Image (cartoon, rainbow, N blue to C red):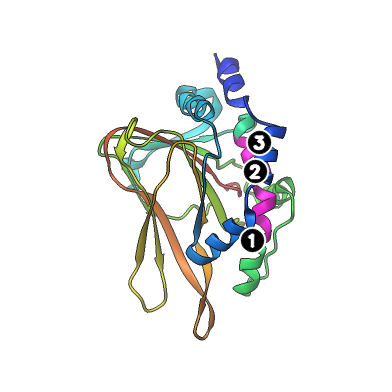
Amino acid sequence: MVATVANNVSRGTGRDLSDRIGALDWQRLSDELGEQGHAIIPSLLQPQQCSALADVYGSADLFRSRVVMSRHGFGRGEYQYFKYPLPELVGSLRRFLYPHLAPIANRWNELLRIDVRYPSRHDEFIVRCHEAGQSRPTPLLLQYQADDYNCLHQDLYGEHVFPLQVAVLLSQPGRDFTGGEFVLTEQRPRMQSRAEVVPLEQGDAVVFAVHHRPVQGTRGIYRVNMRHGVSRLRSGHRHTLGVIFHDAT
């Protein structure tokens, strides 16, 4: 059974996925990330890939831990962290997206006068994480049903934090669920928090800031704190893939 699930999740990976990610308009994505702290990648995954990933939620052998949000005050719903080795599709997304995001992350750190720089390859960054004791994989599947929600939060997990992450909606709004919008908030110095609802369709990905981003002000660059969450599901079931590029302690 696990082998069948793994085969289903492996379809459409490799060269095809690498080419599609490489052909994205990364200048547009970089500009949008700089302007608003998030950017949408339409149809990053195909419907069959989304369905295959959602279906593995019940395959306990693929995961290292399960979190029921209500037990920890995180909201309602649950999620599971994949264990190593990651399913091929999940690992490929991590590996192929990272080289395009690393230059953006490095530019952000330069603007914020943060000394950390990120290598061009994800496996090199993971070595850095593991040498610091961050060796547990962080890609995860989230599952919601009616009345579930995810409180605003940041996915940090340790000293080494890659400042961008990706969430892919695996379910179709209006067909599989209603409500359950992806929400971002930003807190600028001496200002009220600003919230933004990010509309997604099945297979769409949103790239967003993990914890802060640079913003140009009248007196130069300043840091804006970011949080993300999911609003209350009104009906149905919703699955999401979270691709976090740093590992956890």
The answer to whether the residue labelled 2 contacts the one labelled 3, judged by CB atoms less than 8 Å apart, is: yes
In-image side of 111 versus 128 (left or right): left
Residues packed near mark 3 inside 10 Å, few (<14), some (14 to 19) or many (20 plus): some
Residue 243 screen position, x and y as percent: 55, 43
Q: As rendered, which of 49 and 152 lies closer to the eye?
A: 49
**Residue 106: image x %, image y %?**
67, 64
Q: Nearer the viewer, mark 2 or mark 1?
A: 2
- Image quarter of residue 75: top left
Residue 30 drawn at (x, y percent): 60, 60
Q: Which residues are magenta?
A: 90-104
**Image quarter for residue 191?**
bottom left
1 and 3 marks in contact (CB < 8 Å): no
Magenta portion: prevailing SS class: helix
Structural distance between the alpha carbons of marks 1 and 3: 21 Å
Earlier residue among tags 2 and 1: 2
Residue marked by disc 2: 21
